[in-house]
Amino acid sequence: MADIYRMDSHKLYWHLDRVAQWQRGERIAPLYLDMGITQSCNLQCVYCYYAVPEHRTAAIIETQTLIRFLRDAADIGVRAIGFLGDGEPMIHPGVYDALEAGKAAGLDMAISTNGVVMDSGRIDGFLSSLSWLRFNISAGTPATYCRVMGADERIYDRVVENIRRSVERKKALGLPVTIGLQMVMIPECEDDIVPFARLGKELGVDYVVVKQCSDRADDKPLFTPDDYERCRPLLEEAEQLSTDGFRVIIKWRKLGNQGIRNYDHCHGCEFLPQISGNGDLYNCGAFFGNPDFLVGNIHAESFKTLVYGERYAELMRRVQTEVDVHRQCGTNCRQNEINEFLWQLKHPPEHVNFI
């Protein structure tokens, strides 16, 4: 299989101890968190919520707060953290120190970046701190990159050089970090699907992935299932470039998902809540900015206090019992595959012993 990382599925099968706690009705710590560490960005990708000025702020999670949070998260049993939230994490002045602190605390750390800003003097420690590093590039040619990412060709050249340098240092140091490129599928970049895969292969990354453009429930989709189907020949051609050392991963399940859910309630948020770039903790990123689903802020309270507080428990209950996943949630939500699995556990078939 090309998708050796199970990007188009979930990995709860390897955390059955935490799943068993959840089944028993115990309070559990999240397994993993997506989080922003700033709400600022240095690009204007056309598909991004932060592409318009009114959605951007100068908010940032202070470095010491961020490091305290990471140690706190590890202490209560969180197993991994991904800096891949609302802003561009590499422009945070404390990003290198935070990644190293998270790794030292025992967390698996990851980051998703546009790759424009990288400190060559700290790249070795940076790569050593990571389980995986993903570059959001969404193009395979300079012209498409400029159109999609809101940049010019000088920026494209800089990003490509940063990717190349990261791959070189990974190999020189013998590091296990996985390095990949990501394309978010929208009409502006569909002609670059195959060039994108070829670019990744030429740069020597471990994989490239083509993913859906996630939509909010109240937004008009940038790409429909029919659009994805029209691009199938190009996606299949790109997939054929895979080798044992290089994977072209197409998120077929996500691309074909039309918002149909085989579950009626969300339980996935207990395993994967999200933090905004200003430090606000929510059950789900779909609620960012909604005070009704704001648990609290990690500047004001420790993460442990927030997770084991009454508001966290109450909001998890509200998400599970009051949110209509068929009407209120956007297509391809972050917790969708987790929810499919957990719903089956909650609603077993008849005669389960006849395996």
Image (cartoon, grey):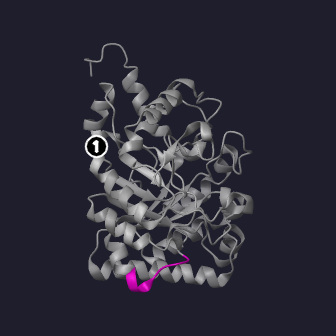
> Mark 1: few, some, or many residues within 10 Å (few <14, many ≥20)?
few
The foreground one among 172 and 308 is: 308
On whether residue 102 falls in the magenta region, the answer is no
Would you place residue 69 above or below residue 121 in this image? Answer: above
Would you place residue 337 above or below residue 345 in this image? Answer: below
**Residue found at x 65% / y 54%:** 231
The foreground one among 164 and 141 is: 164
Could you say where residue 257 lies in the image, as x and y percent from the top left?
58, 40
Could you say where residue 37 lies in the image, as x and y percent from the top left?
50, 61
The foreground one among 155 and 189 is: 155
**Residue found at x 50% / y 32%:** 315
Could you say where residue 94 lies in the image, as x and y percent from the top left?
44, 71
Q: Does any portion of residue 178 appear in the rendered image?
A: no
* 282 relative to 144 in the view: left or right: left
How many numbered marks appear? 1
Q: Does any portion of residue 91 appear in the rendered image?
A: yes
On whether residue 120 falls in the magenta region, the answer is yes
Q: Which residue is mark 1?
A: 14
**Residue found at x 40% / y 65%:** 64
The foreground one among 74 and 83 is: 74
Quarter of the figure that contains the C terminus: top left
Name the amino acid, label 1: Trp
**Residue found at x 34% / y 80%:** 124
Mark 1 lies on a secondary structure that is helix
Q: Which residues are magenta?
A: 116-122
Image quarter of residue 50:
bottom right
Would you place residue 342 above or below residue 353 in this image? Answer: below
